[in-house]
Amino acid sequence: MTHFKPSIFPFQGPLVCLFVMLIGSTSILFGQNKETFAVKADRIITGNGQLINTGTIIIQGERITAAGKTGEIKIPTGTKIIELKGHTLMPGFIDAHTHLASIDNDGGDLAALKETPAHGAIYGTVNAKKTLEAGFTTVREAGSLGYVDVALRDAINRGLIPGPRIHASGPALGTTGGHADVNGWSPFLDLPGTGAIVDGADGVRKQVRLNAKFGADQIKIVATGGILSVGDAVGAPQMTVEELQAAVTEAARLGRKVMAHAHAGAGLLQAVEAGVASIDHGSLVDDEAIEAMKKRGTYLVPTLIILEEIVRDGEKKGVPIYALEKARKIAAERRIRLKKAFQEGVLFALGTDATSDIHGRNGEEFQYMVEILGATPMQAITIGTMNAAKLLGADHDIGSLEVGKLADLVAVEGNPLENIRLLEKPAMVIKGGSVVFNRQK
Ligand SMILES: [Zn+2]
């Protein structure tokens, strides 16, 4: 997915030297496994809804070369074996809605006055490691000012820092005065938005092209109002139909999908009809939108943890009162609507909206899917692996434990089909055939 082209990078020479110097030091270089080894566990959940009791996976370099029932898989003599007695192996988890560059701060929307994308890159470096160690080997970034997500992705792909595979968005596209803008201030202050502020179909097209030019893997748009923004109702449409269509058409022309922030109402339905790949949040998705999403195969990324935590802990965390009120107002109805969408067959993909202190706790989303959506533990795991891989257009490489795919694996102690919360504490994480986290150590 990387758009980084080493051949045109001006510092290619020195970096190649650095690369050679660091080889052999696995604590510094990540995802460079060249060995063959086997992992054995009490059970394997494949990501396709299959359960294999006593399974073995063989990994060669960064890919899976065999997967199946122990005893039916031939392990070549001399192969190193990792025995995970009492454990369950799954594909690396995928979070389809993160904001790695964000962190707890006391500034609220004043953070924009005090911080730059350089702060975000440092926070993102810390958060990327936490996310990976939580078992999330891939994330889809949902809007990142200053293209911090692109920089993180490239640094991770080059082995400079540990972190998940990143599908970057660059800045989210939002309209003047919308959820991605900063509102409620004097017009004499020139405040930057939290995304790229665009108006009109031409403005949208230009920004889609810029995002693609600077390395975005997908395009994030803000189709309706939000919780953490001033003066907009969560269901208020913020992009015109023309703007929505321009985003989807231009992104498609450039080989990219569109993810849409949308909570409710006409703005949500119009985004679906314009052809976005996913509706993110979808808090008050109505019956008409449920039908349209089923018909089109639009994914819903429900970001359950963020709103549950705003409602529960927002006050002590300093969430502004207008945002708390918005969140509380929709909380009960949201549970009903999202459950209905899931039960009626809308495709779901896991996404947390990880911001502030949620980084590294992404796995708690699984429990909310069971509790709120009524998903079985097996369904929840599929939503957080294969479904999310399909949404990202990456299911040829990730999302399930199958021969030929990248060896991204998570092991947890015990059986998550009996206790979903076990997914919150991985024992081991393997990314691209390299053990990147081992709790025993
Ligand atoms: Zn978000």
Image (spheres, helix red, strand yellow):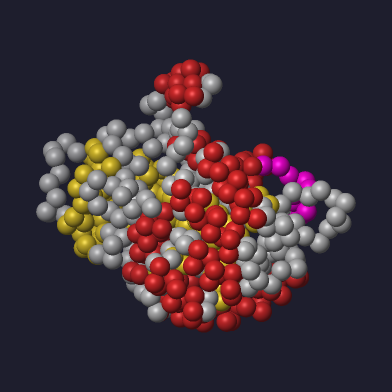
Measured from the top left, where is residue 288 in percent x and y? 49, 79
- Regarding residue 291, the answer to whether it shows in the image is yes
Which residue is nearer to you in this view: 127 or 419?
A: 127
Question: Residue visible at 73% across and 44% down?
Answer: 115
Q: Quadrant of the N terminus?
A: top left
Relative to 75, is 250 on the left or the right? Answer: right
Measured from the top left, where is residue 256 in percent x and y? 46, 49
- Quadrant of the image occupied by residue 179: bottom right
Which residue is nearer to you in this view: 317 or 333?
A: 333
Magenta segment's dominant SS is helix
Q: Is residue 325 magenta?
A: no
Measured from the top left, where is residue 60 in percent x and y? 25, 39
Measured from the top left, where is residue 396 in percent x and y? 31, 50
Question: Residue visible at 47% across and 57% down?
Answer: 96
Question: Residue visible at 52% across and 82% down?
Answer: 336
Q: Which residues are magenta?
A: 107-117
Q: Is residue 110 magenta?
A: yes
Relative to 170, is 299 on the left or the right? Answer: left
Q: How many marks?
A: 0
- Regarding residue 27, the answer to whether it shows in the image is no
In the figure, 293 relative to 428: above or below?
below
In the figure, 227 relative to 209: above or below?
below
Q: Quadrant of the C terminus?
A: top left
Question: Residue visible at 71% across and 52% down?
Answer: 193
Relative to 195, is 340 on the left or the right? Answer: left
